[in-house]
Image (cartoon, grey):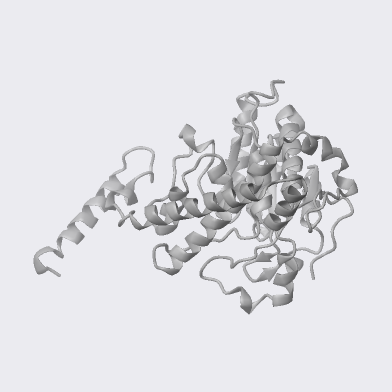
Amino acid sequence: MTPPDDPALVRVLAADGTFAPTPGAERYLPLIDALADSELETFYRDMVVVRAFDRQATNLQRQGQLALWPPSFGQEAAQVGSARAARPQDHLFPSYREHVVCTIRGVDPIDIIRLMRGLTHGGWDPTDPKNGNTRIYTLVLGSQTLHAAGFGMGLVFDKRTATGDPEKDEALIVYYGDGSSSQGDVHEAMVFAASYRAPQVFFLQNNHWAISVPVSTQSRTPLFQRAAGYGMPSIQVDGNDVLASYAVTKTALDEARAGGGPRAIEALTYRMGAHTTSDDPTKYRTSDEEESWARRDPIARMHAYLRARGASDEFFAGVEEDAAAYADDVRIRTNALGDLDREVMFGHVYSEPHPLIDEQRRWLADYEASFEGGKA
């Protein structure tokens, strides 16, 4: 069984899309009231488009075009709200399921596809301005929290944060899941981030399953309460409510960049799909549980809210058309990717030329040449 929600849980939209703030949400309502209709529509569009992309990528993996795909189905609101809360100068450290976080910041979705196809070590260049200060995916669970903590310490040492100029001060957000929260790396990162007052937000997407291990087995207390042990303010938010995710994350980032030190957010959500395309969730989840969470679908919730505010049929139809076109473009470009460029394997292993890499490159060239002309 999932533990009951904390009384301070931040939720703005009820599961049926009605505006029904919890007591914990009251302090965040001015941020939500300040959102323009165009921004609310962007939140919805982001979620619908990434779900179409996610389904297309799953199909591409089933067709043999990708080695693996980690679906984000069901977690769209937590990701969209938090990513839209970041300022342009902020830095984002994803895990490996944050597809819409990356694309919101400017990463080409085909770069995510290239990674899952095995054509690249990392997918994209995190130092390229077009990628919006977005670091590459990390499949070694929890290690990205240490990367983020080190970067956050660097921001403090270099005086790139807490200068009093919110338009220039930098902060960062790092994403991880409930399974990763049991990794030692996460707790070490919290120690260092708290000790050095790094401008870092730990964004935990609690999708309730670490592959086949339920969160109730991983922790006897709500996960957001763990941060208190490091002296870190923490909060629990309904991760299927895009408005709540936005407001909570924006507040946490602004407080962190102003010198308040790190913050922790636990977004309660649900992985409605498989852990990856190599997983079969029917082996460990019940249909009743899945149906219960399907009734809390983040896209349906926002759809109902916008409809009540007067959004038109033309708007919703346009979003669906945009999503379909986006997914079709990904499919076409994926099919045109081709095979691995041999040289890619040897790039970005060391920052400078290295004799061992040169030796391995020569060995592979000789090995492949041995098959030419019928040689074994």
Quadrant of the image containing the N terminus: bottom right
Asked if residue 282 lies left or right of residue 217, the reply is left
Image coords of residue 114 (percent x, y) = 41, 53
- The residue closer to the viewer here, 157 or 107, is 107
Q: Position of residue 137 (x, y in %)?
A: 52, 50
Residue 25, percent across and down?
85, 45
Residue in the picture at 61% in, 33% down: 90
Dividing the image into 4 quarters, which one contains the C terminus?
bottom left
Q: Is residue 52 left or right of residue 206?
A: left
- Residue that appears at 54% across and 61% down: 70
Residue farthest along the bottom direction in this orientation: 283
Which residue is most to the left?
Answer: 373
Up the image or down, 367 lies above or below 35; here it is below
Residue 227 in view, yes or no: yes
Q: Is residue 138 visible?
A: no
Q: In terms of depth relative to the viewer, which is nearer, 287 or 167?
A: 287
Q: Quadrant of residue 353?
A: top left
Report which quarter residue 40 is drawn in: top right
Residue name at image x 18 percent, y 57 percent: 366
- Which sits in the foreground, 45 or 278? 45
